[in-house]
Image: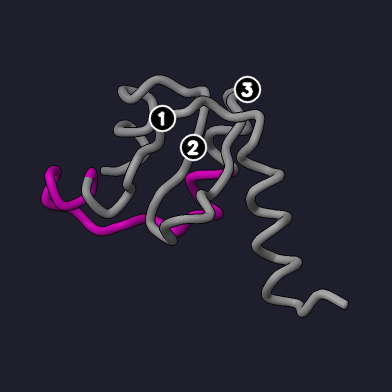
Amino acid sequence: RLAKKEIKLMDMIIGEADMPAFYYDIHNIAKSKKTTVPKFDTISKALKKKGYEMSRTHFSETCIKTDAPREQVEKLIK
């Protein structure tokens, strides 16, 4: 029987499987723009509202995968 932590990891991997191979580190983008890191829910809702898909990565809590162009992701980090 799988533990909750293992199930969460598997759900995360399944969620990102159909996403592009590349990812964005939200903390690095915010650092380069000298701003604070927005909540992931805020980024997720904004991208989905614009018609993009988004998933957190299984390998880093600060990274996302999305089909949105980098410029669009950067606009959300002000």
Say which element carries label 2.
strand
Image position of 58 (left or right of 39): right
Q: Residue at x 55, y 54 (%)?
A: 41
Q: Callout 3 environment at 10 Å: few (<14), some (14 to 19), or many (20+)?
A: few
Mark 1 or mark 2: name the one nearer the start of the chain.
1
Select label 2 or label 3 by which is in front: 2
| Magenta span contains residue 37 | yes
Q: Residue at x 59, y 43 (%)?
A: 45
Image position of 15 (left or right of 28): right
For the image shown, how many numbered marks are present on the structure?
A: 3
Residue 21, percent across and down?
47, 28
* Magenta residue span: 29-44
Residue position marked by numbered label 2 in the rendering: 65
| Magenta span contains residue 39 | yes
As shown in the figure, which amino acid type bears the numbered disc 1? Phe
Q: Decide: marks 1, 2 in contact (CB < 8 A)?
A: yes
As shown in the figure, which amino acid type bears the numbered disc 3? Gly
The quadrant the C terminus occupies is top left
| 12 and 2: which is toward the camera | 2
Q: CA distance from mark 1 to mark 2?
A: 7 Å
Select label 1 or label 3 by which is in front: 1
Residue position marked by numbered label 3 in the rendering: 51
Residue position marked by numbered label 1 in the rendering: 22
Q: CA distance from mark 1 to mark 3?
A: 18 Å
Residue 57, percent across and down?
51, 49
